[in-house]
Amino acid sequence: APAAGMAALSGVAPWRRGWLPALQLVRRGSKAVTRHWKAMHFQRQKLMAVTEYLAPRPAVPPGCLGPRREAPQEDDGYVRLLRRQVEEVFRDNRMIAICQYNSMPDEDVVLMRHYLRKHNIHVKFVLNEIVRPMLSQSKYKNLLPLFVTRNILLVSPDAKVKEMLRVLKGVPQVNLLGACIDDTILSRQGVENFAKLPPLEAAQGQTVGALALLPSQTSSLLQRGCAHLTALLDQHIRQLQTGETGSMAEPPPAQSSGVH
Amino acid sequence: PAGPGGVTVPRAGLKRLVIPPDYSDVTFPERTKLKFMEKVPAVPKVKREPRQLRDIRGPSQEATDFTQGQYGILALGGGYLHWGHFEMIRLTIGRNMNPKTMFAIWRVPAPYKPVTRKSLGHRMGGGKGPIDHYVTAVKTWRLVVEIGGRCEFEEVKPFLTQVARKLPFPAIPISRDGLEQLRREEEEKKLNNQNPWTFERIITANMLGMRRYLSPYDVKFQGRYWGKFFLKHRV
């Protein structure tokens, strides 16, 4: 140690920074590692207090940032499948009726589905959180306010509204909210009116009859003048006949038949 | 919650199904339960050893990372484990784990260090006492046991905390991710410390002659270790 000190003094190696004390406080107190918390020297306590960790303060206090919004969850395969099914439903079926569904006993659900199935109406349970974004981007935007509570869709390729209404009347827990029949949005009242309409063939027949009414009258209109003249002449002849009896009766009928 | 038109909107939506974890790359050791640790080493020491408390002091250099298992008990302080502790760990873990789906391995050796005790009621002096029992030294940041297999951290955590509370030093149950996160947080704390005066800076420059009251070990330990204790709140 003295040799090293001499070498250092002579300037071969420059002075070391941070020298160790010559006299170390070895005899005093307990060992370095104790079971109890060894009391620190006051200077050391001060050093520990000065060199404590100070956490960084953010520029904007977290309370002012507002509620944290969840990151939009990525699409599951399941979500995509359900969305595809709903798109198919909207594409393939002519009639889509949306009803509010209150909880029913399971056997009643099965019965209702059976009766509707007989008329080729399918019952589909849909989730609002899938249907709503889909509808808002398609042409069925006005159906959005209907998809709020728990609901079911009654879909069918042919529009048998009367039978559907009859079945739904027997089920008090399912209430019709609206329907989209042949790309026409109808309210509940509109659906009832639609049900009261006569079937398509009868309606077509009625329209044809109404349209054909005027042309059918054309021939009678055109012949009205002649018919009127003929009637007047007939009347006149009868008057003459009743007035004159005998030979004058025959030639006037021959003349009138010649005129025809 | 009220929706448009004052109608209550039901909250329950689509169920997001979680894919169960994949345990295909887990290899089980031959014996899944913890090995029985002997009280006394096979060749007991004849020569009594000096106390050498430096095997408790400071951070550990061995067994700081996971090898086979996924979860373990991390020591956050120094201490000695004797045979009673080993038995407690072995029995508690053996009781709570399923040997078919989980395995456990020791990360500390069997007691090797002899500890002497003088007989009770005698005065000081008369030489060093005879060997009383054997202990293993554990430093901070050392893993004591490791658990692995087809299990989740939440399954393993209850009995690991139960064991960790009974150890003579502070310990926590931890997983691989937890350990990485701890290390990352330490690094971040070091970087974003707003205090310009750090222990390391003052001691290396010997500001205010602080080296008079500190030991050469404090240069290494940077004020985070004091005796056998680990000061978690310090950077």
Image (cartoon, coloured by chain):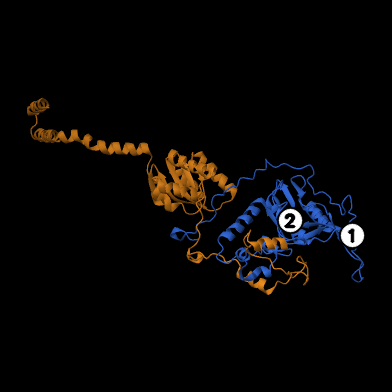
Numbered badge on residue B160: 2
The crowding category of the residue bearing disc 1, from other C-alpha atoms within 10 Å (few below 14, some 14 to 19, many at least 20), is: some
* Quadrant the N terminus of chain A occupies: bottom right
Q: Can residue A106 be seen in this view?
A: yes
The crowding category of the residue bearing disc 2, from other C-alpha atoms within 10 Å (few below 14, some 14 to 19, many at least 20), is: many
Residue at 50% x, 62% y is A67
Q: How many marks?
A: 2
* Position of residue A223 in the picture relative to residue B69 (left or right): left
Residue at 46% x, 41% y is A87
Q: Residue B149's x, y, as percent?
A: 72, 46
**Which mark lies nearer to you, 1 or 2?**
1
* Position of residue B208 in the picture relative to residue A228 (left or right): right
Three-letter code, disc 2: Leu
Lower position in the chain sequence, tag 1 or tag 2: 1
Q: Residue A180's x, y, as percent?
A: 41, 45
Chain to which mark 1 belongs: B
Q: Can residue B167 be seen in this view?
A: no
Chain depicted in orange: A
* Position of residue B74 in the picture relative to residue A77 (left or right): right
Chain to which mark 2 belongs: B
Three-letter code, disc 1: Ile
Numbered badge on residue B131: 1
Q: Looking at the image, which is closer to me, A165 or B67? A: B67
